[in-house]
Amino acid sequence: MDGIDISLINWSRGQFALTAIYHWLFVPLTLGLSFIIAFMETIYVKTGNEEWKKITKFWMKLFGINFAIGVATGIILEFEFGTNWSNYSWFVGDIFGAPLAIEGIMAFFLEATFIAVMFFGWDKVSKRFHLASTWLVAAGANLSGLWILVANAWMQYPVGMQFNPETARNEMLNFWDVFLSPVAINKFIHTITSGFVLASIFVIGISSWFLLKKREISLAKRSMLISAIFGITSSIVLILSGDSSTRLIADIQPMKLAAIEGLYEGENGTGLILFGTLKKPENYTEENKIWEYNFKIEIPKLLSYMTYRNSDAFVPGMNDLIKGNPEYNIMSAQEKIERGRYARDVLADLKKAKETGNTLKYEELREKFYDTDFKENYFRYFGYCFLNNPGSLIPNVPLSFYSFRIMVMLGFYFFIFFIIILIGVFTAKIDNWRWLLRLAILSIPLSYIASQAGWVVSEMGRQPWVIQDLLPTVIATSHIDASTVQITFWIFAALFTVLLIAELKIMFRQIKIGPE
Amino acid sequence: MFESLSYLTLQQYWWLIISLLGAVLVFLLFVQGGQTLIYAIGKNEDERTVIVNALGRKWEFTFTTLVTFGGSLFASFPLFYATSFGGAYWLWTTVLFCFVIQAVAYEFRSKPNNLFGHKTYEIFLYINGVLGTTLLGTTVGTFFNGSKFSVNFSNIVNPCNPIISRWETPFHGLEAIINLHNLSLGFAVFFLARTLALLYFMNSIENSGIIKRARLQLKINALPFLGFFIIFIIILMLKEGFAYNPETNIIKMEKFKYLHNLIEIPAAGVLFISGTVLVIFGIGRSILSEYTRGLWFAGPGTIMVVFSLFIIAGFNNTAYYPSTFNLQNSLTIENSSSSKYTLTVMSYVSLLIPFVFAYIYYTWKAISKKKIELGEIKKETHIY
């Protein structure tokens, strides 16, 4: 295999996306349900009321079924960085590997050890030790999320590193810059609270089913109360962190924001598109990727305000970012490509100087990679050298546009939903609001759709980059044949689908059986 | 604290941690070994439930150790991660496949409406037990026999071929299976996992029938384990190894390299010999008497032996992941590690490891005060 095989890239991306999508079907429930169970068990230990123990054990059973398949899909994800993205693993492994290892040492063992106590320790350890174990499982699961999200945030916003021309890789310079980057903190808060919201809806949905069937009334109402409070609190944090996320994206990934908004020409006082539909115009090309609106509902100036806290601020569109806009100091994509190629040529000359033993030239070129001017003005565009066409910088516009709106609209819906549920529980009218109970069941799949849509925005919206501005996805792959990945893609697709069906069947039966 | 250590010391420290994790992983593969013995030891459904539940309470430790082993390799030796996982694609993907089906098998096996029935999940466990152990052993075998790969950092500036590491055979790892020396280690690990599982059953289960059959099976499995282990070690000690000159970084073949390493690193030699004695003592005493705590000797013995094998694979100027395509592309502790800064950061994280071992020991002890028996499992609300 010589040259870049686009088919290989597509299948590798497909396999990673497949694994990530399946993995994310199970993880958010683990993140949120672990805390809900911990709340319930805390009440049991505090009150000594056996009903709470029964409730805790019921949700724990569902937690266990979901947890196993989440673990199974997770191991593939970790190793796929090596199997399918070996160039990536080398180019940034010095930075990216650390959070993965810390996750294993700090979080996985915590989770794996105390989950055994949580499931099998009821009659073997004291109540308090058991409760501590349940809390530690929740802490472990969410710590695991923390480190994975730190790693993911670094891909979106690479900081705290220096390129080493000798080894042709990026090396960590400051761990705290990586760990505490604003993107990492925001991503962690936004993602885990989305898991809390999903888990709350899951518990409320199943409890609603019990109420509709007039079964397990006490379990259902108590579970709804806990979950609605947890859901409202999480939703507030989720919405606020979503807002900060928009500001961060405007700053570090303006192309992603432009694609999300379907914004081609930047303007002052840009409005926010609440909703609309897109159509492909006749003059659409892969170069310009211009989509048009069929219709749109827009709130004037809101996007400018949301992104820069100034309703007249300029928000760049895709054309500004491709063609450049000197008025707002935006460099054209072609210029970035040229600068990236210059950085690559310097690196190539350095390698040649080393091979030919030209020490003087080698040292001179090596110095450049540590020179601030070269780093800021040339090497930061290194990834652009691999792009032939500026249009490839534009991600999939309709996918980004619709996914974002699905995520945001459902996010707001969930917030209102939790409030109504809480009112229903407090006024003791929830049993009579059968429409709400049915809506609650329907909301379970909606929460999964919103959660997946969030990741689509995040990951599809940053294409063509695997590391923003530094490494395009097409360069990150392993040296394998597309047919090889095609085979494993279908094997995993079949396996995950079958396991998902089995999981759902088991889950439905366990719910039907109830807490007995 | 770690900042004052030299780069080489940090690289060696991390190789020791990887070796320790690898050694603990091989010990914990007793869970996989046990999965291949469910029907040989359990003669009725109740007994099989006891066995699966005894193993099921430990499967996550093996799984987590594997994940941490992978993550730590990524963080400390990213060139190995990129080269081996991206190159030996089929080998690693098959290993992963085996572990995916294991993870769900325990949780789903006894649940009603589980789509396939419990036997299918037991087959999943069996596949994981056979392939997971054999292939992991075979993969470690390549640390001593090499693989056909090349590494060229200059590729990153080649727009047509920017991938820095390439596997130079179309079999992508499957070729490791046809090397008899690799395979002898694969089979040794497989039979060792079964042997340790039998010792685990004897140590942890309260059931005279199971213990009697475990003791019988111990004779059947310990023999091939010792056979394959001895074959592997004899070939290893007599074969040429991949040595490098730390000053010129030139890699060349050296006769009896691994024997030299064992002698020249006395700690490795002592660990290897005392570990082997402990394993044989644990097995022998369990076969020859009514002793049921052989695991407490064979388990630590296994960790010591595997630990020493990793040490002689990477220390004393040895290329731990040799390239038979181009010797000079072989991976050493020095040329494949993370930067000094990353290793320093990770070394601080490694201080958590003793704490992790401590709480695992404490909780393990807390929930395993009594041996596992059917009556207790029947009372459990969470059954595998």
Image: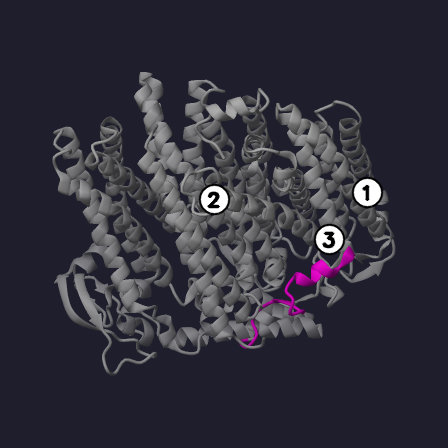
Query: Could you confirm whether marks 3 and 2 are on the same chain?
Result: yes
The image position of residue A118, as x and y in percent, is: 45, 29
Q: Residue at x 55, y 30 (%)?
A: B46
For disc 2, the marked residue is B117
Q: Chain of mark 2?
A: B
Task: Give the alpha-carbon distance from disc 1 to disc 3, as whole Å.
Answer: 20 Å
- Residue B172, located in which quarter of the rendered image? bottom right
Q: Earlier in the sequence, mark 3 or mark 2?
A: 2
Is A128 included in the stretch rendered in magenta?
Answer: no
**Mark seen at residue B265:** 1
Q: Judge left or right: residue A256 versus residue A388.
A: left
The image position of residue A87, as x and y in percent, is: 55, 64
Task: Decide if residue B348 is in sight here.
Answer: no
Q: Residue at x 61, y 38 (%)?
A: B38
For disc 3, the marked residue is B141
Q: Which residues are magenta?
A: B159-180
A479 or A501, nearer to the observer: A501
Q: Chain of mark 1?
A: B
Q: Judge left or right: residue B269 versus residue A224.
A: right
Q: Nearer the viewer, mark 3 or mark 2?
A: 2
